[in-house]
Amino acid sequence: MASFMDGNPALKSLSSDLRRRMDQSVTDFQANLAATRTGRASVHMLDQVKVDYYGTPTPINQMAQVSAPEAQLILISPWDPTMVKEIEKAIQAADLGFNPLSDGKVIRVPVPPMTEERRRDVCKHINKVLEEHRTAVRNVRRDGNEALKKLTRDKKISEDEEKRALEEVQKMTDAEIRRMEELSQKKEAEVMQV
């Protein structure tokens, strides 16, 4: 679909900025979904866990080899063996329902099968995260609409151009929200699958 805003020099940068910020919200939502627990072990389950690495909060996958050799197990092999205890503590503190076990060199994180209640909780969590990201996209839309109104007030664009641009921003918003809702439905189906 050809963009009216991209074809208008006064609106081109605003359009690309709004698109970039909305895409960022969707990308962030996808990262959250990847870290959401399903019934199977996934290396992404620990993506949101940060370990205090000499004063810097660091993701586990940047300080260790993380793998899922079995459907119910995550294996973490830290590159710096002195960090084993810190990684264990961070996983427990993240409150993901995991109980890491270590032998001093590697950390085994058994992924217990999910109960029906836990599955429902995860779906509620997905919906909460979805709503936060919908709001983020709507905030981008609001900023865009305010910028368009200002351009009209400053006589940089006509009222007709403003009207077309506002419609385009709304279409952009609807498309991004629809994308996130589809991702959310897929993830919920995956979570509820026993």
Image (cartoon, helix red, strand yellow):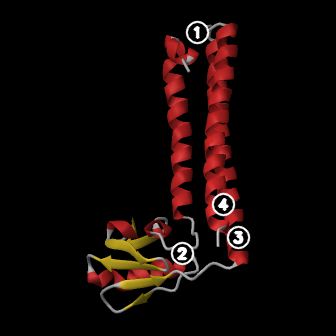
Find residue 139 and report its image quarter: top right
Secondary-structure class at tag 3: helix
Can residue 86 be seen by looking at this rendering? yes
What residue lies at 52% left-to-right and 50% top-to-bottom?
A: 28
Q: Comparing marks 4 and 1, which lies closer to the viewer?
A: 4
Q: How far apart are marks 4 and 3 (CA)?
A: 11 Å
Q: Position of residue 117 (x, y in %)?
A: 73, 76
Q: Comparing marks 2 and 3, which lies closer to the viewer?
A: 3
Q: Distance between the residues labelled 2 and 3?
A: 16 Å
Dot 4 or dot 2, earlier in sequence: 2
Q: Mark 2 points at which residue?
A: 94
Q: How crowded is mark 2: few (under 14 residues within 10 Å), some or many (20 or more)?
A: some
Secondary-structure class at tag 2: loop
Q: Seen in the image, is 33 located left or right of residue 44?
A: right
Q: Mark 3 points at which residue?
A: 121
Query: As displayed, is residue 75 above or below residue 173?
Result: below
Q: How far apart are marks 1 and 3 (CA)?
A: 50 Å
Q: How far apart are marks 2 and 1 (CA)?
A: 50 Å
User: Which amino acid is tagged 1?
Assistant: Lys
Q: Distance between the residues labelled 4 and 2?
A: 22 Å
